[in-house]
Amino acid sequence: MEDDHDMNRREYLQSSGFLAALGGCLGDPTDRSTPTTRDDPTNVETERGTGSESTPGVVDVETVRTDHLLTESRNASAVVWKDDDGTIYADAEEQPVASGTDFSRVVQEAVDAGLSKLVIQGGEFVAEEPIELKSDTVVTGMGRGTTIEVAGSAAFNVEGERTGSADITTRVGGDTIPVDDTSPFEEGEHVLITTDRTTSYRDQPYGEIHTVLSVDAANGQIAISDGGLFENYRPENGATAVGLDMVEGVTVRNLEIVGSDRSVFRAGVTATYAKGLLVSQAEMHDLPHSGVLMSSSIFSAVNECELYDIAYDGRGVGYGVTLSDAVRNINIRNNVIYDTKNHCTTVGGSGNDGLPRLLTFRANEYYHDDADVHFAGVVQFVNNRFANGSGGIITGANETYVDGCDFRNLAGDAIKNRGQPRELVVRNSQFEAINGMAINLYSNPTGLEKLAVAGNDFQRVNGNVMRFRTPDGYTSQLVSITENIVRTCGSTAFSLSEIGDSSIEDVTISGNQIEDVSNYGVSAGSVTGPVRFLDNSISEVSGSYAAILGGSPNLIGTNDFNRYTSRGLLLRAGGLVTGNSFSRGSNDAILVYEADDVCITNNNFTQTGGSDVNEIDSTNCMIAQNDIERGIETSDDSTVVRHNFGYRTESSGTHTASGSGGRSFDIPHDLVETPEVANVWAESADAAGAHYVSSKDADSVTVTYRSAPPTGSGNLSWGYELSTHFE
C-alpha cells in the first residue's frame, strides 16, 4: 500500500493542468471544449482504473513517477507554471498562491508568502522586474525547458541591507574592535569593516565582512571573527564597523536566463550582502552586463553554468561573472564561459565596501576572451582552461595562485599584470601556442615580493616565456623558477631586471629544461641579490648568450649548456661556477665581464668555439681544475689560473742532455704560455757547474753555464719546476 503523502502528492500533480502542457498536451491545446484535469479531476481515477486507453488532458501515472523534474516538484512548496492562455500560476498544496500574466509579480508573491522552494516548470517567462529572493529560497527550473527573459535589471536579485554603523574609536589589533556605539550589532550577525585607507591602484578602499562573535555594550566593543585584511584598524583612516543583514542560503539552479535589450545594464542573477548564494546548472546568454554579479557577498558559488554572448551595445562591458567589493570565499567552478565583450570573469572594487579576497576559480573553461582579476586579497585559479581567446589571466591581486591550468592558442599574453600584486605563484600548468608572453610582468612593472614559477610546460610561446622587472623603489624578496620545461619559443625564456633604485634580493633558477629558444635562455644580468643557477639544461639557444647572470654572490652549478649559437654564459658578478658542462658552442663558453671575485672550477668544455673562459676587465678571479679544450684568456694579472686539465700552467720533471762543448741547453715544456717562474737544478755531477736560467720562452727555458760542462753521452741531467704564475 502506498504512503498517503505520496498518493496525495501524486494525485495533486496529476490534477494540475500544467502537467498536460508539460507532457506534450495529450489533447489538442487549441480545443477549448476538451475538459482538463483542472476542470474534471475525476478523470484521474478513470485513467488509473482502466490502465488502457488514454484520456485527453490526463497525464499517465507512470509519466509523473519517472520524470525526474516532476519528482523534484513533489518536494516543492510552490510550482510555477503557465497555461495555454499565458496565465502564470504559483500553486502550493493544490491551491494557487498567485496568478496572472506578470511572471515577476506571481513569483514575488510566492516568495513573499514564505514559500521557500519554487519549481518553475517548462515555458518561456519574462521577468519585467527583478525577483527579490529571501533567505533559504531555492528556485529550480527545468534546464533549457525553463527560459526567463530579463526585461528588468536582473532576473533574480538577492539583496541584504546595512543595519547601522559605528566608528572604530581606537587603534587596536586582533578580533576586538572598540566602537562608539554597540547598538547596531548583535551576536551571530555580520559586520563590514571599512576604512578610507586605499590601495595604490585605483584608490579603492579596504573592507572585510566578519561574523560578530559577541557584543560588550558596557565596554563599548565588539568581537569579530578572524580573516580580515587588517592587522590594525586605524581611526585616522576612517575605520568604520557597519552592521549587515545578509540574505542567506539562496539557490538558483537549472534554468535558462536570456536578455533581449543590450542597451541597458542587465544581469541574470545579482547579489549584495548575500551569504551562501549558489547559482548552479544555469545557462545565461544575450545579456548586456553579467551572467552573475555578486557584490559584498561571502561563502557563495557559481557552479556548472554556461555563460556566453554577454555584451553591452556600444560599451566595453560584458562579463560572465562579476565579483566586486568585499566578496570573500567565493567559488567559481566547473563553468563554461565564452564570447563576452570584455572578460569572462572580472573582479574589482566599485563601491565603498572594499576589496575582494579569497576567491577560487576552479575547473572552468574560458574561450574567446580574458579572465580578468583587477585586484583582490587572495585569488586562486585551479585546473582552468583558457583557449582560443585574446588572453588568459590579468592579475593585480595581492596574492594570485595559478595551479594546473591550461593556456592554449591565445592571441595575447597568457598571464599579465595590472596593478600592484604582492605575490604570484604559477605551477603545474600548460602553455601552448601563445602569441604573446606566457607570463608578462614587464608591460606593467610590479613590486612583487614573491614570484614562483614551478613545474610548468611552455611550448610554442612567441614572446618571452616570462619577463619580470621590479619598478623603481621596490624590493622583490624572492624569485623562484624551478622544474619548468621550455620548448620552441620565439624570444628569451626567463628574463629578470630591475628599474632604477630597486632590487631583486634572492633568485633561484633550478632544474629547468630550456630548448629551442630564439634569444637567451635566461637573462638576469641586472639582479642585485644572489642568484642560484643549478641543474638546468639549456640547448639550441639562438641568442648572443645562453644565459646572462648578474647577482652577487652567484652559485652556478651542474648546468648543461649544449648547442648554443654564440656564447654560453655571460657572468656579470662574482660567485662560484662549478660542475657545469659546455659543449658545441660557436664562441666563448664563459665570458666574465667586469666582475670581481669569480671562481670557475671543475667545469668541462668540449667542442667549444672561442675561448673556454674569457675574462675581461675583471679582478680577483680564479680559474682552476677545469677540463679545458679551447683555452683561457685573461686581462688582469690578479687572475689565478691553476691546475686545469688540458691547459698546462705548471710543469715539473727531469730533462737529460749530452755535453758537446757548448754552454747553453734548452729544456722544453708544454705550458700554455711563457713561464713566469722557472726553477732548474742539477741532477747529475757533470751538470753541477755554475749555471743559471738565461731565457724563458713559449715552448722552452734555457740553462746557460759560465764554462762548458764535460762532454759525454747523456751525462747532463736537470730537475725543473716551471709555472706561468707566481704564488
Image (cartoon, rainbow, N blue to C red):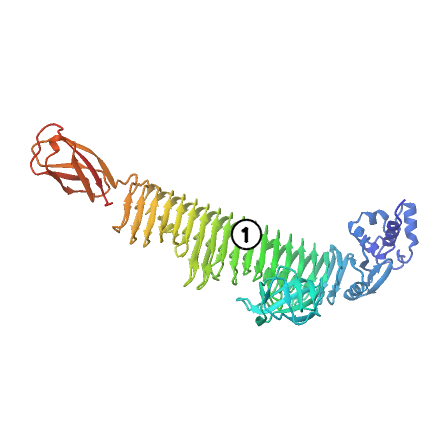
Q: Is residue 573 left or right of residue 338?
A: left
Q: Report x, y in % for residue 222.
A: 67, 65
- 476 vs 433, nearest the viewer: 476
Residue sitting farthest toward the top: 713
Residue density around tag 1, few if under 14, some if 14–19, many if 20 or more, within 10 Å: many
- Give the quadrant of residue 103: bottom right
Q: Is residue 27 left or right of residue 170?
A: right
- 250 vs 262, nearest the viewer: 250
- 550 vs 282, nearest the viewer: 550
- Look at the image and tell me in which quarter the N terminus lies: top right
Residue wearing tag 1: 407
Q: Secondary structure at mark 1?
A: strand
Query: Does residue 392 sit above or below 178 in this rendering?
Result: above
Query: Does residue 696 sit above or below 92 in this rendering?
Result: above
- Look at the image and tell me in which quarter the C terminus lies: top left
- 587 vs 689, nearest the viewer: 689
Q: Residue at x 86, y 56 (%)?
A: 16
Q: Report x, y in % for residue 666.
A: 15, 37
Residue type, mark 1 in image: Phe
Is residue 140 among what the camera can see?
A: yes
Is residue 340 among what the camera can see?
A: no
Q: Report x, y in % for residue 214.
A: 69, 63
Q: Is residue 335 left or right of residue 412?
A: right
- Give the quadrant of residue 356: bottom right
Q: Report x, y in % for residue 153.
A: 69, 67
Q: Is residue 403 left or right of residue 443?
A: right
Report how many numbered discs are placed on residues in the image: 1
